[in-house]
Image (cartoon, rainbow, N blue to C red):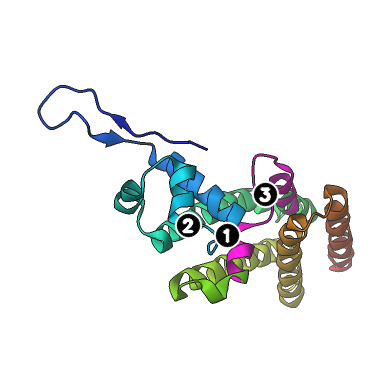
Amino acid sequence: MLVSTEQAEQEGGAGMAGRKQFDIAAALDAAMIQFWRSGYADTSVDDLSRATGLNRSSIYSSLGDKDTLFTRCLERYTTRYGDKYDAALSCAADRPLAAARAFFDITLERIADPGLPDGCLVAQTVMATPVLSASVAARAREAIGFQHTRLRAALRAGRLHEEAAESFATHLAAVNQSLAVMSRAGTSTEQLRAIVDVTLDALARTLGARD
């Protein structure tokens, strides 16, 4: 699917005609979706060319080689959804249970969006570690760690003691990643929400007992 264009610049002046212009943000989004849908190993430069509408030389000169482009796409994905998760958890100090539900809602809404691939680019990347470069694999593991860190900070803000906050952060992060994996395997939205409800019930009991 063509999501960006290469077109000659029509300005006057020597040397300007024929310069190729395209929307780098749109190209990165298209490449991100391609990697997300097919995975790093099963995405070729030709696949990226078809997805972005750019020829191979434009990809290499403007977006980098496959490893570089994949890293840029992973950064784009983690920033986009990381910002959403942070916003969801921003009320944790006053309403920790509502914050946790809002956190999961970000994932469930992403899964339910028909315009996006199933699963999670970060989770898929971690599972593909054997075929990744060391730097890409390390960045994916770092992204998983960030999710645990933001959850732990939110639960501590919600006045869970340190041990409980650590345990629940690990559990909630694991559940969140499992939702993405299970969605890719065809688990229904209703079943995924039931998993979230069980997790939130356990959190609610712990929050209720904290005082």
Q: Residues within 10 Å of mark 1 (few under 14, many from 20)?
A: some
Which one is closest to the eye, mark 1 or mark 3?
1
Q: Of the residues shown, which amino acid type is indicated by label 2?
A: Ser
Q: Residues within 10 Å of mark 2 (few under 14, many from 20)?
A: some
Camera-side residue of 72 and 55:
55
In the depicted structure, whether residue 161 falls above or below residue 150: below
Determine whether, in the image, residue 46 is placed left or right of residue 111.
left
Rounded to the nearest whole Å, what is the CA distance between mark 1 and mark 3?
28 Å
Q: Of the residues shown, which amino acid type is indicated by label 1?
A: Gly
Q: Secondary structure at mark 3?
A: helix
- Give, as a single range, the part of the protein colored magenta: 104-126
Q: Which mark is residue 39?
A: 1
In the depicted structure, whether residue 73 falls above or below residue 145: above
Rounded to the nearest whole Å, what is the CA distance between mark 2 and mark 1?
10 Å
Q: Residue at x 15, y 22 (%)?
A: 12
Q: Is 113 a magenta residue?
A: yes
Q: Secondary structure at mark 1?
A: loop
Which one is closest to the eye, mark 3 or mark 2?
2
Residue 11: quadrant of the picture: top left
**Labels 2 and 1: the sequence-earlier one:** 1
> Can you name the residue that lies furthest to the front here?
46
Q: Is residue 141 visible in this depiction of the protein?
A: yes
**Labels 1 and 3: the sequence-earlier one:** 1
Determine whether, in the image, residue 98 is placed left or right of residue 124.
right
Residue position marked by numbered label 3 in the rendering: 88
Residue position marked by numbered label 2 in the rendering: 44
Which one is closest to the eye, mark 2 or mark 1?
2
